[in-house]
């Protein structure tokens, strides 16, 4: 996955990973990809819902040893 920016949300719990994602994605250009690192399992359902409501594209997630990597492409391009 080609990533333009990584956001570390380890240790943060709902709703903070989504709040931080919303702030971070504003610094990206349309089409760029944000990778979010989290350990709150709620992000697996929260991120697709947030992306759908905000016009961004949820690209999927990967989970390994309790760490969840989530990818979102900024929309508007």
Image: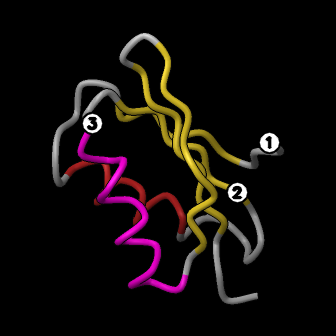
**Is most of the magenta stretch helix, strand or loop?**
helix
Q: Look at the numbered discs 2 and 1 and tell me whether their residues touch, using CB distance below 8 Å.
A: yes
> How many residues crowd mark 1 within 10 Å: few (<14), some (14–19), many (20+)?
few
Image height of 55 relative to 31, above or below: below
- The reply, left or right, for residue 42 in relation to residue 20 is left
Question: Given the current orientation, which residue lies at the most extreme right position?
Answer: 2
Q: Position of residue 65 (x, y in %)?
A: 43, 10
Q: Coloured how? A: secondary structure
**Residue 1 drawn in magenta:** no
Question: Given the current orientation, which residue lies at the most extreme top position?
Answer: 65
Task: Find disc 1 in the rendering and name its residue.
Answer: 1
Image height of 50 relative to 65, above or below: below
Q: Helix, strand, or loop for circle 2? A: strand
At 70% from the left edge and 57% from the top edge, which residue is drawn?
33
Stretch of the chain drawn in magenta: 41-55
Nearer the observer, disc 2 or disc 1? 1
Nearer the observer, disc 3 or disc 2? 3
Residue 46's image quarter?
A: bottom left
Q: Helix, strand, or loop for circle 1? A: loop
Question: Which mark is on residue 41?
Answer: 3
Q: Position of residue 22 (x, y in %)?
A: 40, 66
Q: Position of residue 26 (x, y in %)?
A: 53, 71
Q: Look at the numbered discs 3 and 1 and tell me whether their residues touch, using CB distance below 8 Å.
A: no
> How many residues crowd mark 2 within 10 Å: few (<14), some (14–19), many (20+)?
many
Q: Position of residue 69 (x, y in %)?
A: 52, 35
At 45% from the left edge and 80% from the top edge, which residue is drawn?
52
Real-space CA distance between mark 2 and mark 1, rounded to the nearest whole angstrom: 9 Å
Residue 13's image quarter?
A: top left
């Amino acid at each position: 996955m080609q990533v333009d920016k990584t956001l570390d949300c380890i240790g943060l719990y709902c709703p903070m990973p989504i709040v931080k994602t919303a702030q971070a994605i504003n610094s990206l250009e349309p089409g760029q990809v944000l990778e979010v690192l989290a350990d709150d399992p709620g992000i697996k359902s929260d991120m697709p819902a947030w992306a759908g409501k905000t016009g961004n594209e949820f690209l999927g997630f990967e989970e390994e040893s309790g760490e969840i990597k989530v990818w979102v492409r900024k929309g508007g391009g």
